[in-house]
Amino acid sequence: MKLSKDNYFSTEANKEFMSVSQFKSFLSCELAALAQINGEYDGFSSDSMLFGRAVHAWNEGSLKEFKQNNPELYKKDGTLYAKYAGIQDCIETLESDEVCMMALEGEKEVVFTAEMFGTPWKIMIDSYNPDYGMFTDLKVMKSLHDKFWSSENGYYVNFVEHYGYDMQMAVYSEVERIASGREERLEPHIVVVTKESPPDKAVLKGFLDRADIMLAQVAIEMPHILAVKSGEAEPVGCGKCEYCRSVKKAQIIDYRELI
């Protein structure tokens, strides 16, 4: 399959290629991941997702098309409803910050594919700037300083580690390196803008320091994930996610088991 920006999110592409979002979906809930791959479930929309999509559309230069496709966000005069006014605040915050705009320079929404860990992978880079030895991903977050308890590690982690963005940057850097034939990886960055009022912002770096560790962890998980994706192994549902809640039947549970 010849992958492009137009068919990147298609069911066919999801079946043929592994992606970071698909990989993380399998780790969270195998049933939901398979449903997404088969086009039976595309995730339930949320205001948080709309914020991210709008800011990405601005970065890509397609904000006009986003407005046309999401008229429910805008009043007749073209301004955002109060509920979504933070979208414009995020955009203006980025536009007025030289450091963020410098990090976001480059070609937009660039697609790469590469064979890795026994399967073809796909990535789409938000801002690609190989002449400066870097690429950048854009994130809209609640806060820069949120912390999350990691039961696996036994301590609190930041949002980058909690959402697996460190692993995402490792995979992106390696897929791009393989696809371009380059020996060295480009330096990944994440531009973060928050939904606070006023929005906070930062450019995050340092992802190559742990890239090999992240990639090793991906390699460990891949044999089972590929077995589930191909139908060789039965998928296991988490029982708690949106998809599982939408298809499960009620169970009789001793209330003391809820924890």
Image (cartoon, helix red, strand yellow):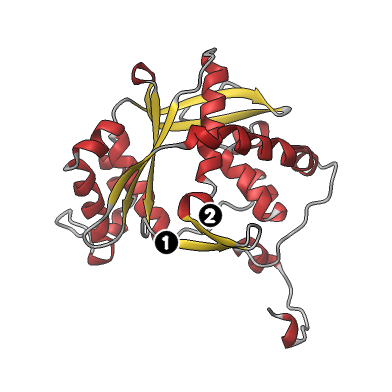
Answer whether residue 167 is visible to the viewer in this image. yes
> Which numbered tag is attached to residue 206?
none
Instruction: Name the kind of residue labelled 1 in the image.
Output: Asp
- Provide residue 84's location: percent of width, then percent of height: 28, 61
Residue 29: quarter of image: bottom right
Which one is in front, 124 or 96? Answer: 96
Percent from the top left, x then y, of residue 159?
A: 46, 54
- Percent coordinates x, y for residue 188 in the rendering: 43, 32
Instruction: Measure the C-alpha gap from mark 2 to mark 1.
Output: 10 Å
Residue labelled with disc 1: 146
From the viewer's perspective, tell me whether residue 110 is left or right of residue 245: left
Task: Kindly identify the amino acid type of the residue bearing the numbered disc 2.
Answer: His
**Quick one: 61 or 182, which is closer to the camera?**
182
Which of the two residues, 27 or 8, is positioned nearer the viewer here? 27
- First along the sequence among labels 2 and 1: 1
Question: Mark 2 and 1 residues: CB-CB less than 8 Å, in contact?
Answer: yes
- In the orientation shown, which residue stands out farthest toward the right? 232
Name the image quarter holding the C terminus. Answer: bottom right
Crowding near the residue tagged with mark 1, few <14, some 14–19, many ≥20 C-alpha atoms within 10 Å? few
Identify which residue, 119 or 231, lies in the foreground.
Answer: 119
Instruction: Give me the residue at 40% from left, 35% from top.
Output: 189
Identify the residue position indicated by label 2 in the image: 162
Residue at 45% across, 24% down: 186
* Above or below 5: residue 243: below
- Callout 1 secondary element: loop
In this view, 140 is above or below 170: below
